[in-house]
Image: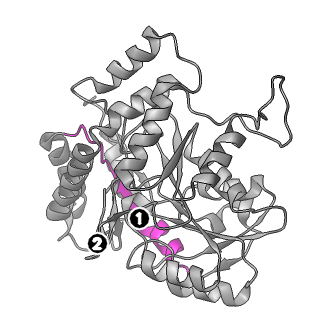
Amino acid sequence: MAERIFLSSPHMSDEGYEQQYVKEAFDTNWIAPLGTNVNEFEKELALKVGIKAAAALTSGTAAIHLALKAAGVGEGDIVFCQSLTFSATANPIMYEKATPVFIDSDYQTWNMCPKALEAAFEKYPEVKAVIVVHLYGLSADMDRIMAICNKHNVVVIEDAAESLGTYYKGKQTGTFGHYGIYSFNGNKIITTSGGGMLVSNNEEKIAKARFWATQSRDKARHYQHSEVGYNYRMSNVVAGIGRGQLKVLDDRVAKKNYIYEYYKRELGELEGIEFMPHNEWDAPNYWLSAMTVKGKVKPLDIMLALEAENIESRPVWKPMHMQPVFEQYDFIGTNVSEELFENGVCLPSDSKMTDEDLERVVNIIKGLWIQ
């Protein structure tokens, strides 16, 4: 069996930056939650993306949860949520016993459709928050989305779990809304093995999120809790990995762009293939290279052919409004997200891939067109 090619796997720096920070945590015996690495990772990430404050947490999901709490979302409140995304975007809405309304995507961005968002506001004017996603590292149309949300005076949460290093009109995704979140899961563009970050220009809200994330422990000599809290704070060891990874973020973005351009050049002329969109105002990180396939060759044909050669690929996310757990909730749109799911495939986009790996993937796919 040929060597495995992964969709997107952890990629530690060649310089060993991560090990230096982790060693420091061990040398000081500071391996528990909190510590120098956590504090510095928050500062360095905030500086990198250009925002005032950040809270290092156990996951991007935890970050969305605390963003919803900070926005005052509670039982019965309506939250608009992009449908074409991973379930971690929507699950925290349920944690707060709120009601999701799922919003369709458009073909221009693969992200939240501004027209569908406007229609949703007409139907549900009493909305507490909007969660917009930057799917696969593609930026949503933030000017139009923010204009709509500002008109309705509603809190915007950016799920930038997949888009660290992506810029919209020269500004980092995750920094347009009231809150932004990033993920450092093992498959993300940089990883801490597991972890996330909540960011905002509202420093008081970030301080409150840190309080909730450390079990809402009041300032008292004894253990006193006046609010329900969560065990969401990142460990000092994990944060050390994140500090090292942050140093190579630009290199990872460059490699992901190289992979996308390789695929687009080699496969873009095949009948029925269309790659995910690129807009003039969008500088994507291309976390995953994705395309749609229509015609005699189906997405499943591609995935099975790659799988037979020990190469990992996967479908585009199944929209939330199509998921059994969310099927009772409303959906606003024209089923663009459903069509992207039915016709989409994510190609292996591992930042460790060589040109030989890319050629291997491309030749297998091209072979399906000449059978």
**What residue lies at 26% left-to-right and 50% top-to-bottom?**
253
Q: Position of residue 199 (x, y in %)?
A: 52, 52
Point out the tag, 1 or 2, that comes first from the N-terminus: 2
10 over 227 or under it: above or below = above
Magenta stretch: give its range: 334-353
| Residue 261 or residue 22, whichever sits in front | 22
**What residue lies at 43% left-to-right and 53% top-to-bottom?**
162
Mark 1: amino acid: Gly
Mark 2: amino acid: His
Q: Quadrant of residue 14?
A: top left
Determine whether the residue tagged by mark 2 lies in a helix, strand or loop. Answer: loop
105 over 16 or under it: above or below = below
Quadrant where the image shows the N terminus: top left
Write down the residue under mark 1. 344
Quadrant where the image shows the C terminus: bottom left
**Quick check: 275 left or right of 177?**
left
Write down the residue under mark 2. 278
Q: Quadrant of residue 150?
A: bottom right
